[in-house]
Image: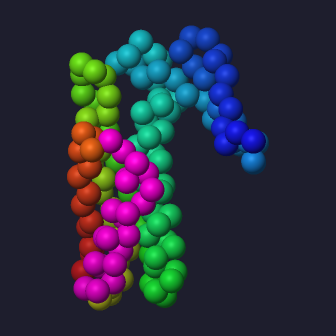
Amino acid sequence: MPTVTAKYLGDLRTECVHTASGTRLVTDAPVDNQGKGASFSPTDLCATALASCAMTIIGICARAHDVDVTGTTIEVTKIMSADPRRIGRLEVVFTMPDRDYADTQKLLIERAAQTCPVCLSLHPDVEQVVTFRWAR
């Protein structure tokens, strides 16, 4: 069974369906590449996948070590390269909740983020800059 199916809707838009859940999402080409920018672009989804995956792996790790990371936020800035057009750089900023994390917990969380499957699946030419903002 496929994981995702996609249908071209025309006008540089696709409708994607997550097979197991039936969840639908529409993509649009970005404004800088002939689209309307009315929804996530395919490369936006790549940046989103990195954020979501890293946070999920952090959550799994935190749960296993009884560390609360609820409320953590992530901002991803995607920078495109030309010739060939591709994602050149992803700047990922984690803002951690204002809690008294031990240095060992911080290290554990930071290492977990760098081992997420999406992070490890991206081509080495895609520069990944990861920053953690700790309140304390």
106 vs 21, left or right, is left
Residue at image position (28%, 21%) is 84
Residue at image position (57%, 19%) is 13
In the rendered image, which quarter is residue 96 located in? bottom left
Total labels: the figure holds 0
State the image coordinates of residue 29 (x, y, percent, origin top left): 47, 21
Residue at image position (45%, 46%) is 48
Residue 68 in sight in this render: no
Q: Is residue 23 magenta?
A: no
Residue bounds of the magenta highlight: 103-123
71 vs 82, left or right, is right
Tell me if residue 56 comes above or below residue 6 in the rendering. Answer: below
State the image coordinates of residue 82 (x, y, percent, origin top left): 24, 22
Q: Main secondary structure of the magenta part?
A: helix
Q: Is residue 104 magenta?
A: yes
53 vs 107, left or right, is right
21 vs 134, left or right, is right
Residue 76 in sight in this render: yes
Closest to the observer, 77 or 115: 115
Image quadrant holding the N terminus, namely top right
State the image coordinates of residue 34 (x, y, percent, origin top left): 41, 12
